[in-house]
Amino acid sequence: MNFGPLIFLGVFFTMACSWFGMIVVPQLQIGGQQPVKLEATGQMYPLPRAGLAQQGAAVYRANGCAACHSQQVRQGPPVFDVKLNDLGTNAAQVADIARKINHAAGAPLPGKNIWRTPVKKDADAAAKRLTDAGAKAAVVIVPTGADIERGWGARVSVAQDYLYDQPLMLGSRRIGPDLANIGARKPGADWQLWHLYNPRLITDGSFMPAYRFLFNEVPRRKDAPPALGALDKTLVAKTFPEPAGETVTDIVPTAEAVALVAYLASLNPDAPLFEAPAPVPPPPAAPATNTPAAVKP
Amino acid sequence: MNAEPQASAPLAEAAPKVGFAAVPIWLIILTALLGYRGCMYVDQFGGGFDPKVYTPYASFKQLDDLQTKDANAEMIQRGKRRYNETCGQCHQAGGLGTPWQFPPLAGSEWVTAPDPARLIRISLHAVQGPITVNGQQWDLIMSLNAITLGISDDDLAAILTYIRQDWGNKAPAVTPAQIAAVKKETGDRATPWTAEELKAVPLK
């Protein structure tokens, strides 16, 4: 018997279903997504990466970083902090209400969170009681979850975060830590460069491969000036001691390494979005420097 | 050689045949149960197929409730609406009043005083008689007030916050607690205030 047409129809139907469900529907849902204007700062989000960071994304891709590092943060249900910004004129009454809310001894301090609850309605009610007494109180949404407790991100990753990424390097395995907000987590380009040159110099017991081919090793006489663009060795003074002989080796990052670090520094999706509410991030600190004091290995 | 065909004859009879067999009933039930569970799961965690809804959020409405809303802006919006329904009939939508009939609220020192104690009294019980507003002499009979209109403390606080923070006025917001406090102080007063009485009210 000839079942050819039936088998063809079965296969066609199966493929059409998955094509429709995995290509057409997502395309209809998020295919037309546009940058949005952030209410907190008035900036557009996301902004395209700077040119050097875009080159770095290609280096990231070429070296297969996404095989071991994911770039997506997962999140559990949020909790709500009642934050007391200002005690107002009626401090005694506010303190009394705050004590009734959190059952804690001692007067509440302005600028501190006084209560945490998983129910938004309760937090709103508590904030209203404080506001009615003349204080300035606000409810702050705090995402929870294992990833966020590790400091890997401020909130769940959403499609908006990857609007300008092509190809999307989400990664599926976490052999190394998630890199979604690596730009905010590790301050200083120097740290990143040394870590790429040899992760063991910075993090003891790291099993990340060393990307020494992204660096030039330039030997020089000990009394000669260091090579142009050589990495500052104070950060790794303990783990990478100077040899005793006449010559030392300077580590000079190639353009690829610099671009990769620029890409890593650009990774920090922390803007509060409608679909991913989060506390408004503090304004960016002064640009990261190469001083060892700012580096926490 | 002769024995071979005899041996293979039963094999030929046992060869598989093309045909149809009924699907076992347990397989149908299992498929139905799995399908049911799948639908329940999608219903529970699918977020209504809304592209804005990501795990752990369940629905657009839940996300909408989570948005940090500016309480002051909402209050002013509500105050504006209630003002236009009541006070704005005389004092006008722009707060400029009507010359020789209704005094202006925009820029008025009675409205923008840092302590709203006198403003709350005016809005609660009205004001009557000669009064100076923006350096101009008025002789008023204010016909409406919050108590006869039955405006709640919350709404009155919103209205007063609105008139203190729009049209270029920049004064601190009024809270329902302040209004309740003034109501307590004035007791069951029903007569309008005069400018002299109001000036006797201490400002913090």
Image: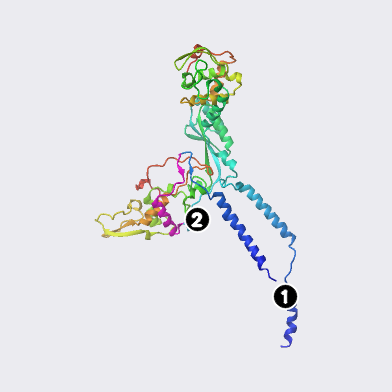
Residue A123, percent from left and from top:
56, 35
**Residue to which mark 2 is pinned:** A171
Pick out the residue farthest to the left. Answer: A223
Q: Is residue B59 above or below residue B171?
A: below
In this rendering, is residue B151 above or below B3? above
The answer to whether residue A69 is magenta is no
- Taking depth in this image into account, of B16 and A121 the one nearest to the observer is B16
What's the CA distance linking mark 2 and mark 1? 51 Å
Q: Which residue is mark 1?
A: B15
A23 or A91, nearer to the observer: A23
Residue B14 quadrant: bottom right
Residue A76: where, in percent of width, then height?
Answer: 55, 46
Q: Residue at x 37, y 54 (%)?
A: A258
Q: Magenta part of the protein: which range?
A: A41-65
Q: Which chain is home to disc 2? A: A
Q: As shown in the figure, which amino acid type bears the numbered disc 2? A: Gly
Residue visible at 60% across and 46% down?
Answer: B47
- Residue B172, given in percent of the width and then of the height, sits at 48, 25
Do circles 2 and 1 both sit on a common chain?
Answer: no
